Image (tube, grey):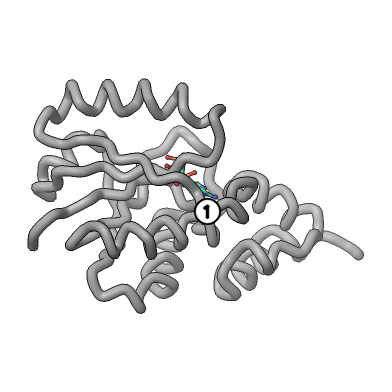
Amino acid sequence: MGNIAIYPGTFDPITNGHTDIVARASRVFDHIIVAVAASTAKNTAFSTDERVDIAQRILAEHKNVEVRRFEGLLAHFVRQCGAKAVLRGLRAVSDFEYEFQLAGMNKRLVPEADTVFMPTSEHYSYISSSLIREIASLGGDVSEFVHPLVNDALVERLGKHHKK
Ligand code: ADP
């Protein structure tokens, strides 16, 4: 399968910032596994199956991209997949501190893999899943930040109790 990169995250929901990283990384690596975290301390708006299903449908056009759920430790999943890279997106300097710590710990846990950071495209730098959820739950329009499929799911899940 060549050079495999794991792109882990919660993807609650997947945004245009995420898909941009995947599209660009799919030209750098032979194979990308988008790893959707099942066991997360976060209270998610969408179930693991929903997050996987939406990401799968949106990313289907990339033939070297696969979406899978993973439980437990990322390091175990990385090793199990035989990946040599963990892909993470960086939006701002504020992302860096946590990401740098995570990269160090993962290197310790799975020495054969390295974290590769990809900078966000400028126009996606302010997009985060949490902000998207918040705007949608308050009845705001997030259609320019997410795929239409995600927009529909957000309106259905978070926006329907909101009165305009
Ligand atoms: P996590 O819970 O692991 O932070 P997320 O789903 O929020 O998972 O993000 C997954 C990855 O995508 C992280 O590396 C994050 O920095 C990156 N990411 C999120 N939003 C963007 C964006 N707008 N541009 C680039 N990278 C992003």
Give the side of residue 69 with respect to residue 164, left or right.
Answer: left
Residue at 54 percent of width and 61 percent of height: 16
Image height of 161 relative to 93, above or below: below
Give the quadrant of residue 9.
top left
Residue at 10 percent of width and 45 percent of height: 80
Q: Position of residue 18 (x, y in %)?
A: 47, 55
Give the quadrant of residue 107.
top left
Q: Position of residue 113 (x, y in %)?
A: 15, 36
Q: Position of residue 81 (x, y in %)?
A: 13, 50
Which residue has dot 1 on it? 121
Give the side of residue 9 with respect to residue 159, left or right.
Answer: left
Q: Quadrant of the C terminus?
A: bottom right
Q: Quadrant of the N terminus?
A: bottom left
Residue at 24 percent of width and 28 percent of height: 106
Relative to the observer, which residue lies in front, 79 or 39? 79
Residue type at numbered disc 1:
Ser
Label 1 residue SS: loop
* Label 1 within 8 A of ligand 1 by Cβ: yes
Looking at the rendered structure, the number of numbered marks drawn on it comes to: 1
Q: Position of residue 60 (x, y in %)?
A: 35, 76
Relative to the observer, which residue lies in front, 59 or 84? 84
Image height of 55 relative to 18, above or below: below
Relative to the observer, which residue lies in front, 116 or 76? 116
Residue at 47 percent of width and 28 percent of height: 96
Give the side of residue 30 with respect to residue 20, left or right.
Answer: left
Q: Residues within 10 Å of mark 1 (few under 14, many from 20)?
A: some
Examine the rendering and report whether any part of residue 44 can be seen: yes
